[in-house]
Image: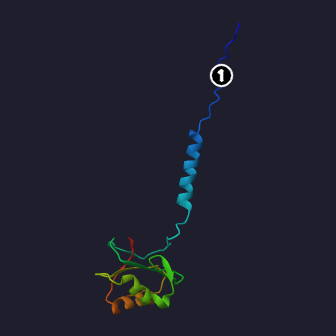
Amino acid sequence: MKFKGRNKISPEFSMSSMTDVVFLLLIFFMLTSNAPNALDLLLPKAKGKSTSSQNVSVTIDKNLNYFVNNQQINGEYIEIELKKALKDQENPTIILRAEESVAIREAVKVMDVANRNQFKVILAVRPK
C-alpha cells in the first residue's frame, strides 16, 4: 500500500519576489544618486515663468563657480565662452541662474557681457 503525502514540496524556484526587491533597489539608487551634470542651486523666488527655449545657460553657484551649459569655466573667460557658444545664433539668449546667496555684482558681470554683445538675458527664478 502506497501512501501519498498531502504536503508535497515543489522543486520550482519563484523569482518574482527577488525581482521586486531588485526593482525597488534600482529605484532607490536612481533617486538618491547625484546626477553628474545637475547643479544644486537655491534660486531666488519671484512670480512669473521661465521660457523653455534657450540657447545658453550660465550658472553661478554660491562658491562663485561659473558654468556655461553645465561645464565649469573660469569667470575671467565668460565673455569668450559665451561668444563661442552663441556664434551663428539668430536671437542669442542667455538663461542666467545665480544662486540666492551670490552677490549681485557677479550677475551684473554676466549681464554686462551680454549687453556689450547684444545677447538677451533671462534671469531664472523659483516660483513663489
User: Can you identify the residue that label 1 sits on?
Assistant: 8
The reply, left or right, for residue 81 in relation to residue 62 is left
At x 42% / y 77%, what residue is drawn? 44
Q: Assign the N terminus to one quadrant of the image.
A: top right
Furthest-top residue in this view:
1
Quarter of the C terminus within the rendering: bottom left
Mark 1 neighbour class, 10 Å CA radius: few under 14, some 14 to 19, many 20 or more: few
Q: At which x and y percent is residue 99?
A: 47, 79
Q: Nearer the viewer, residue 46 or 122?
A: 122
Q: Nearer the viewer, residue 76 or 49?
A: 76
Farthest residue to the left: give it: 90
Q: Residue placed farthest to the bottom in the image?
A: 116
Q: Is residue 36 above or below residue 75?
A: above
Farthest right residue? 1
Which residue type does callout 1 highlight?
A: Lys
Of 128 and 81, nearer the camera is 81
Residue 29, x across and y down, in percent: 57, 57
Which quadrant of the figure has residue 94? bottom left
Q: What residue sits 38% from the left and 91% below the top? A: 112
Residue at the (58%, 48%) spot, across then down = 22
Please tell me in which quadrant of the rendered image residue 46 appears: bottom left
Give the percent coordinates (x, y) of residue 102. Answer: 48, 83
Q: Is residue 91 above or below residue 52?
A: below
